Amino acid sequence: MKLILKLSGKIFDEEDPQKLLTLKEVVKELVNEGNRVGIVTGGGSTARKYISLARRMGSNEAYLDLLGIWASRLNAYLVVFSLNDLAYMKVPESLEDFIQAWSYGKVVVTGGFQPGQSTAAVSALVAEASNADLLIIATNVDGVYDRDPRIYKDARLLTKINTEKLKEILERTQSVKAGTYELLDPMAIKIVERSKIKVIVMNYNKLGKLKDIIAGKEISTLVEPE
Amino acid sequence: MKLILKLSGKIFDEEDPQKLLTLKEVVKELVNEGNRVGIVTGGGSTARKYISLARRMGSNEAYLDLLGIWASRLNAYLVVFSLNDLAYMKVPESLEDFIQAWSYGKVVVTGGFQPGQSTAAVSALVAEASNADLLIIATNVDGVYDRDPRIYKDARLLTKINTEKLKEILERTQSVKAGTYELLDPMAIKIVERSKIKVIVMNYNKLGKLKDIIAGKEISTLVEPE
Amino acid sequence: MKLILKLSGKIFDEEDPQKLLTLKEVVKELVNEGNRVGIVTGGGSTARKYISLARRMGSNEAYLDLLGIWASRLNAYLVVFSLNDLAYMKVPESLEDFIQAWSYGKVVVTGGFQPGQSTAAVSALVAEASNADLLIIATNVDGVYDRDPRIYKDARLLTKINTEKLKEILERTQSVKAGTYELLDPMAIKIVERSKIKVIVMNYNKLGKLKDIIAGKEISTLVEPE
Amino acid sequence: MKLILKLSGKIFDEEDPQKLLTLKEVVKELVNEGNRVGIVTGGGSTARKYISLARRMGSNEAYLDLLGIWASRLNAYLVVFSLNDLAYMKVPESLEDFIQAWSYGKVVVTGGFQPGQSTAAVSALVAEASNADLLIIATNVDGVYDRDPRIYKDARLLTKINTEKLKEILERTQSVKAGTYELLDPMAIKIVERSKIKVIVMNYNKLGKLKDIIAGKEISTLVEPE
Amino acid sequence: MKLILKLSGKIFDEEDPQKLLTLKEVVKELVNEGNRVGIVTGGGSTARKYISLARRMGSNEAYLDLLGIWASRLNAYLVVFSLNDLAYMKVPESLEDFIQAWSYGKVVVTGGFQPGQSTAAVSALVAEASNADLLIIATNVDGVYDRDPRIYKDARLLTKINTEKLKEILERTQSVKAGTYELLDPMAIKIVERSKIKVIVMNYNKLGKLKDIIAGKEISTLVEPE
Amino acid sequence: MKLILKLSGKIFDEEDPQKLLTLKEVVKELVNEGNRVGIVTGGGSTARKYISLARRMGSNEAYLDLLGIWASRLNAYLVVFSLNDLAYMKVPESLEDFIQAWSYGKVVVTGGFQPGQSTAAVSALVAEASNADLLIIATNVDGVYDRDPRIYKDARLLTKINTEKLKEILERTQSVKAGTYELLDPMAIKIVERSKIKVIVMNYNKLGKLKDIIAGKEISTLVEPE
Ligand SMILES: Nc1ncnc2c1ncn2[C@@H]1O[C@H](COP(=O)(O)OP(=O)(O)OP(=O)(O)O)[C@@H](O)[C@H]1O
Ligand SMILES: Nc1ncnc2c1ncn2[C@@H]1O[C@H](COP(=O)(O)OP(=O)(O)OP(=O)(O)O)[C@@H](O)[C@H]1O
Ligand SMILES: Nc1ncnc2c1ncn2[C@@H]1O[C@H](COP(=O)(O)OP(=O)(O)OP(=O)(O)O)[C@@H](O)[C@H]1O
Ligand SMILES: Nc1ncnc2c1ncn2[C@@H]1O[C@H](COP(=O)(O)OP(=O)(O)OP(=O)(O)O)[C@@H](O)[C@H]1O
Ligand SMILES: Nc1ncnc2c1ncn2[C@@H]1O[C@H](COP(=O)(O)OP(=O)(O)OP(=O)(O)O)[C@@H](O)[C@H]1O
Ligand SMILES: [Co+2]
Ligand SMILES: [Co+2]
Ligand SMILES: [Co+2]
Ligand SMILES: [Co+2]
Ligand SMILES: [Co+2]
Ligand SMILES: [Co+2]
Ligand SMILES: [Mg+2]
Ligand SMILES: [Mg+2]
């Protein structure tokens, strides 16, 4: 099985080495069982810090996005160094780079690729180019809710939805200011739809149970392409 | 003034050196008057030929888009070689490359950057990163119509619209299969909106009158960001 | 066994996915039997289209050759994407790149390297650098004829010749205008001679019988270095 | 005059856009007066955050230093984007890259180059390679003290010392654990000595008075090579 | 005027800084008068030393040529460092690199590009791509002789010949073993012919009188393309 | 076991293919027994020749060091070509490049990385980044002496010392002029100390007995990090 795992930048904000060591164990096990794994990292608070500073200096949106991308690459290197021998030792900076890196057979870790798109879009591109069976979005909530769970305390978790429904939900909250893309942006959804990629949204605090989640035995949201 | 000019790949399909020589003359004049010019080229029939062949071989959508991107770079080199001394002699392959290339002061010509987006999205990214005053989309029709003019003979040309209206029109026709993005895809419009970029859609057969079009004296469509 | 296969650009002009799928099958079989395979692609009609357009714009010969090289790289990517997992996923752009790519153990596919030489010269360079046992030139005729078979209908196929004889025959027809190098240019022959590389010229429509041709059981021309 | 300015990573930790805008003003003025300016940025708290996290994951010292280097490059891009047109738009990643970047005539901004050395060593290398007249080290204290001023409240500022004396002072406090190099490491001093580079250590809060400091009219330390 | 100057590797074997300082003076003067200058360096005794050692270790001809190419690049860097501000600070490694480097307006210095061709072929390619008016071959003899002057003491200098005649003369002496290409190889002559490039062969000991030689007032050989 | 072998540039000065063939045999044996091997080459007389010539032309110390680095890379390619299939076919130019190269599993050969440090420092950096068990310094004397053995005929070989003692000895002889770093420079020792790397200094004429030396059965010096 080929799977792409997208990690919210927020996992790095917690500065907890244990979370990265758990990630390493899960990835090692998956690889030892013959699976191929790709990882995409978000930019988290490092991205937000640099973007905020540069916005107050008057930089344009493209430059702000680039700072977020470089921050996400710093997170990616943290994962690369934790995986060490399991990983391709360079963080690809474009889909073309990723395709070459992927062909060596190791775990490939990327951050962002380009302004104007989220790291979730990167994970969809990477899943498409590697003919992945599954795209897993690991974030700080348990899955997709009917409303933004950070804002609405009574938001309900959806265990299974299609991309049409997902678009409808996200349209109410999404924005494209640098550093504010959330969960999945329109490009991510387009890619998922055109290549019929199966998506699971899960909580990164449950990475230790990733195999149960893939098997549908643990809480998460399954997004099916329309 | 800084302006980015997006050329439909169809201008190269006509295999008419005169069109490229006219382009060269216009660009030279603009540069001599102190303007900065960036150019983005579509993939045209070369892209469609390779995409079609690879689709029949069973390639995934990401690979198909990459073939279209390389075709668009071939078109870009045709423009580079026609401009010669006026141009930066390498076609940038990402926005990061473009930003560096742009800083040398010459005319920079790019093709596509990445699967999942059109060359129109590239032109919007490039306009944003260079703080351009104007994005000109030169295509094989006179501007934006209320319906796809290739299909509906009675489609009416709109001389001025906003991006909200444009989205509404395009939503009926747009698709994201490799090689079928048209006019402006959702990413292009998002960028144009978030950075308030002024857009003109015009016919590439009127490139010789580009200055009149910019001055609003010739037929074309002005798209204003919402 | 290590073998380098040079494909005429004309095989891509036929826009027949079956030819590329046959190629894939043959390469897969060779690789599975423990052989190493390198592939070099010509530029074909895409090259000729761009060269012709640029020549009419007044570009110099070096630029024209570069357009032909980029066209050949587009053909090379078509082969890369058809081979997918079997292939090194990047088309090397110089012999130094090729040497590095080759050392990973996958099938490496290149287009042209440099103005002033044909893709046949590239295939000879690549054969020399990889210590190949055999260089196969697959073209749209059955082998080397005593006269250009496109022009003289009574041209006779030669089943075995040496490089001295080959040079004599080619000297009557070769030219070095961009995009017009044919079969083997002087550099290709020099390399073949200095490194004593065995060459077979065959018809690309017989790629399905490549193993028979190598075994000498099917029509083709064997060129022996002097 | 050619001058290299080394900025402590701590200037970015303050997340104060005003400091970067002041820097921009000073650099612009220097450039307009015909001077060449190079800038080297430290890694600051971003470096320390990533190094600390990776150290707790068990990474080796080389990897820790690399994380610090990438953090310093993020700081460098912040400066690049603030300078915009004044700057070379790519952060060089080695001295070879710097030399090429420098030759274009713009302000070049670098972060770290390599594990095992501080960004102060980078600034000395860069000063040597560009035949700079002056290396300015801007940090969070007013100059060189007879003891580490962060620890000893009664440390005395030295307005002029030679490198022999400096080595003596620093030997008591320097360390080479990743992220803990301070002020100037042994390599920085060796370079300064072998190429007789004049050094000024100053407070980055006085960047607005940089020209007074160069003229010796404001508090700072002048380090003369032995 | 645009001119390309090819320096025999032998000029570096003499280890005489004065020769390089004379070269610098001449180049500076030419540049100050508004000319564009490109330089190509041979590999000389460094190339021969490494090639001989590797040949005795059993390396193939392509690897031997590569060692010669890297040696020629070492010579090229010597010229780059002597020219310093006048020069593009990186030695291009292919014609594509050269074209980009050339467009910045500085003196560009290259060594070899590729196995299978001499640095004289490189100089012809570079002359063609830059639309040079003149290619100057500076070597250790006064021009082209009717026989190899190193072997035949009674060889006669020819002050003016065409490329047909030159081919005839060189055919008797040329060889393509790595490190033994001399004066002009077949590729160099082909390029010169197809692009009608004017060539002067001169003695590098007379570089101080380069302007007189160009003006036809000093001994040398003028080679006219057929 | 992972081991890094640093070869003095002097081994190449002897122009003896047998020495490189012995090296190849030893490396092949080590690799076949399951060890990982990295090699770092010094610049030797080629470096000294170019540095001397450029110094007399007036180049700065950074440029002189770069010439030495390129010379060491030429030596590195000689080793790469002798190892051929065993080796990664490109010489990494920075520690970042090395880390990526190392992850492919082949023998990686580097020359110098950066001005201001010796190739011994490179070997220490490389040993640290690859978590090597052992760093072997192969030079033209049998190990570390209490005084420079080239100058003092009565210098005594030390079979075991710690880094404190080594620093004391070297401090009397070390210099940092380009091309004159010897044995181990301060950066090399700092790296060895901070990462507790075990070092053996041996004679390159005894490479055939490398395994005995590692086992402590042959004359050499063991340096233990303090
Ligand atoms: N309907 C919804 N269901 C789930 N989450 C939602 C929804 N709408 C908005 N969100 C928000 O999306 C966030 C997930 O985005 P996430 O943090 O994974 O992206 P990221 O870009 O990688 O992170 P970062 O920007 O921090 O690097 C959640 O924290 C949640 O608040
Ligand atoms: N409402 C509309 N108004 C104008 N054009 C439209 C509209 N809807 C669809 N189109 C189509 O969009 C096309 C313009 O796309 P264009 O050819 O410029 O893109 P491109 O991707 O660069 O081209 P190519 O793919 O050939 O390289 C027109 O030919 C037109 O038929
Ligand atoms: N004798 C001394 N005089 C002055 N400063 C000293 C002395 N000894 C130690 N220091 C310390 O050196 C520090 C300066 O290092 P600085 O922060 O500029 O380096 P940096 O590596 O760029 O920073 P960062 O690691 O935060 O990016 C001061 O904060 C000071 O406490
Ligand atoms: N007919 C001829 N006229 C002039 N020179 C000739 C002729 N035939 C052979 N040669 C030789 O060609 C040599 C010039 O080649 P040159 O040294 O310039 O090439 P290079 O490849 O750059 O040098 P290197 O290989 O040393 O770097 C002369 O030394 C001369 O002996
Ligand atoms: N105490 C000492 N013990 C051993 N060798 C010493 C000592 N002091 C100085 N040396 C010198 O160090 C030299 C070893 O340096 P080595 O030649 O290995 O370095 P390198 O930089 O790789 O060589 P090169 O510069 O020739 O490439 C010996 O030749 C020796 O003369
Ligand atoms: Co986000
Ligand atoms: Co299109
Ligand atoms: Co052809
Ligand atoms: Co620090
Ligand atoms: Co030669
Ligand atoms: Co040395
Ligand atoms: Mg890139
Ligand atoms: Mg580098």
Image (tube, coloured by chain):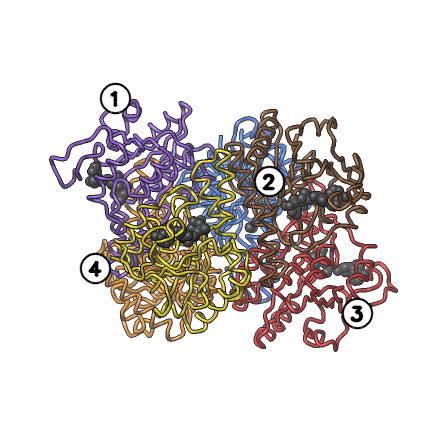
Chain colours: A brown, B red, C blue, D yellow, E orange, F purple
Residue that numbered label 4 is attached to: E154
Residue that numbered label 3 is attached to: B160
Residue that numbered label 1 is attached to: F217
In the picture provided, is C27 more to the left or to the right than B201? Answer: left
Q: Chain of mark 2?
A: A
Q: Chain of mark 3?
A: B
Q: Quadrant location of the C terminus of chain E?
A: bottom left
User: In the image, what residue type sits under mark 2?
Assistant: Glu
In the picture provided, is B67 more to the left or to the right than C109? Answer: right
| Cβ of mark 3 under 8 A from ligand 2 | no
The percent coordinates of residue A25 (x first, y second) are 58, 28
Q: Is residue E171 visible?
A: no
The percent coordinates of residue C94 (x first, y second) are 48, 48
**Residue E192 placement: quadrant:** bottom left
Please tell me whether residue E48 is drawn above or below residue B40 in the rendered image.
above
Density class for disc 4 (Cα within 10 Å; few <14, some 14-19, many ≥20) is few
Please tell me whether residue C183 is drawn above or below residue E155 in the rendered image.
above
User: In the image, what residue type sits under mark 4?
Assistant: Asp
User: In the image, what residue type sits under mark 3?
Assistant: Lys
In the picture provided, is F33 more to the left or to the right than E19? Answer: right
Q: Is residue D146 visible?
A: yes
Please tell me whether residue C104 is drawn above or below residue E131 in the rendered image.
above
User: In the image, what residue type sits under mark 1?
Assistant: Lys
Viewer-nearest residue: F211 or D221: D221
Mark identifier at residue A14: 2
Please tell me whether residue C47 is drawn above or below residue C109 in the rendered image.
below
The percent coordinates of residue B87 (x first, y second) are 55, 65
